[in-house]
Structure formats: structure tokens, C-alpha cells
């Protein structure tokens, strides 16, 4: 067999084996967002933005696209989700103290205002996740109100 052919067969074999070794899915079905939602109380348009543009990478539950069936795409997505959750996980809201919550909210404001979030790689394949200026403004308003509220709650009694 020619070397090129051998390499092609080896690659094919690796590809096939890869399909059977899957990264664990991010699919918590409990009420993992309850604490975040009750404390920050996002109005419907903001909640809609979160659901369509943020929760897939920043919560414990991802709605996977069909191509997540295919390795190595599933590894690539798992990596994005892990990385995204490492920076901000709405399902882990109770693990942040007031200062951290405030900082996360500030970063949400900045990344949404600048268009850094949601990531381009995501909006290429999720057209509905692209934010309009109106949606950005709604998120920014909600952040302002929520930070003010958190700050006043944090004052000593
Ligand atoms: C495709 C996955 C994905 C989506 C969708 C996504 N993010 Fe992210 N986000 C990431 C990753 C990965 C990081 C880690 C930093 C980086 O690589 O830019 C991150 C980082 C962040 C950070 C922390 C920034 C910092 O400097 O540490 C904030 C805040 C954030 N995202 C907010 C959002 C908001 C709000 C949305 C929805 C409007 C959103 N993200 C949508 C993947 C995503």
C-alpha cells in the first residue's frame, strides 16, 4: 500500500473511533437558573436575549445543534461551553458573592455593548442570536437597575 493510502486509512479509523468517545453533555434539567432569575428579575425581552444568545454557553444547560453529533465538532463545542462557564455561569449564581455578581453584571454590560458577546462563532450558526441595538439597550438597562439594587442590598444594616 502506498504511504498516502495508509495515512488516509489511519485518519479514517481515528475519525470513526472518535465518534464513540464523546465529551459529557452539558444538560442539567433541574431548576438551575432559579436563583439567578429570582435575584436579577430580567424583564421578558432580556430573558429572551439570554435564552437565545447566552445560556447555551453560560449555563448548565445547552440546547445542542444537530452537528454536535459529529466529532470533533462536539469537542470544539464542549470546549467553548466549558470556557464560557468558567468565566460566567448563570446556573452557579449563588456561588458568587455580591462583589462578584456586580463584576459579572458589569462585564455583561461591556461585552454586550461592544458586541463581543455573543461570540461570532455562535451567531454564524445561530442567526437569531444576533442582537439588535434595541436588545442591547434592554440588556444594558437591566444591568444598570440590577447593579443599583444589588449595591443597596449590600449596604450594612
Ligand atoms: C458560543 C458560546 C458563547 C455564547 C453564545 C456567549 N458567550 Fe460569553 N463567553 C464565551 C467564552 C468562551 C468566554 C470566555 C472569554 C472569551 O473566550 O472571549 C465568554 C466570556 C464572557 C464574559 C466574561 C468576559 C470576561 O472578560 O471575562 C461575559 C460577561 C460574557 N461572556 C457574557 C455573555 C453574554 C451576556 C452572552 C449573550 C448575549 C454571551 N456571553 C454569549 C462563550 C459564549
Image (tube, grey):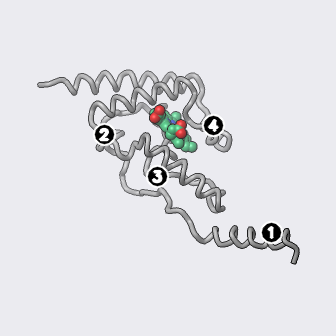
Percent x, y of residue 17: 65, 72
**Quarter residue 130 falls in:** top right
Q: What is the spatial separation of the Cα atoms under label 3 and label 2, in whole angstroms?
A: 19 Å
- Residue visible at 28% across and 27% down in the picture: 150
Callout 1: few (<14), some (14-19), or many (20+) C-alpha neighbours within 10 Å? few
In this picture, residue 124 sits left or right of residue 115: right
Badge 4 marks a residue whose secondary structure is helix
Q: What is the spatial separation of the Cα atoms under label 3 and label 1, in whole angstroms?
A: 37 Å
The numbered mark, 3 or 2, whose residue comes first in the sequence reads: 3
Q: Is mark 1 within 8 Å of ligand 1?
A: no
- Can you see residue 48? no
Q: Residue furthest front?
A: 3
Circle on res. 8: 1
The numbered mark, 1 or 4, whose residue comes first in the sequence reads: 1
- Residue visible at 51% across and 45% down in the picture: 57
Pair 1/4: label in front: 1
**Quarter residue 1 falls in:** bottom right
Task: Check the image and report above or below for 66 versus 1.
Answer: above
Q: What is the spatial separation of the Cα atoms under label 4 and label 3, in whole angstroms?
A: 20 Å
In this picture, residue 36 sits left or right of residue 6: left
CB atoms at circles 1 and 2 under 8 Å apart?
no
Q: What is the spatial separation of the Cα atoms under label 1 and label 4, in whole angstroms?
A: 33 Å
Percent x, y of residue 123: 63, 39
Judge by depth and name the residue closer to the eye, 57 or 12: 12
Q: Which residue is denoted by mark 4 in the rendering?
A: 120
Q: Residue furthest left?
A: 157
Badge 3 marks a residue whose secondary structure is loop
Q: Which residue is denoted by mark 3 in the rendering?
A: 61
The numbered mark, 3 or 1, whose residue comes first in the sequence reads: 1
- Residue visible at 41% across and 43% down in the picture: 89
The numbered mark, 1 or 2, whose residue comes first in the sequence reads: 1
CB atoms at circles 2 and 4 under 8 Å apart?
no
Amino acid at each position: 500500500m502506498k504511504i498516502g493510502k495508509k495515512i488516509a486509512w489511519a485518519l479514517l479509523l481515528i475519525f470513526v473511533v472518535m465518534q464513540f468517545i464523546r465529551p459529557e453533555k452539558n444538560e442539567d434539567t433541574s431548576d438551575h437558573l432559579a436563583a439567578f432569575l429570582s435575584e436579577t428579575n430580567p424583564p421578558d425581552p432580556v430573558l429572551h436575549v439570554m435564552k437565545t444568545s447566552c445560556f447555551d454557553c453560560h449555563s448548565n444547560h445547552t440546547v445542542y445543534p444537530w452537528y454536535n453529533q459529529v466529532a470533533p465538532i462536539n469537542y470544539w463545542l464542549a470546549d467553548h461551553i466549558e470556557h464560557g462557564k468558567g468565566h460566567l455561569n448563570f446556573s452557579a449564581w449563588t456561588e458568587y458573592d455580591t462583589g462578584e455578581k456586580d463584576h459579572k453584571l458589569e462585564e455583561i454590560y461591556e461585552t454586550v455593548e461592544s458586541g463581543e458577546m455573543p461570540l461570532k462563532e455562535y451567531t454564524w450558526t445561530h442567526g437569531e442570536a444576533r442582537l439588535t441595538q434595541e436588545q442591547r439597550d434592554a440588556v444594558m438597562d437591566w444591568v444598570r437597575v440590577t447593579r443599583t439594587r444589588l449595591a443597596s442590598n449590600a449596604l450594612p444594616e
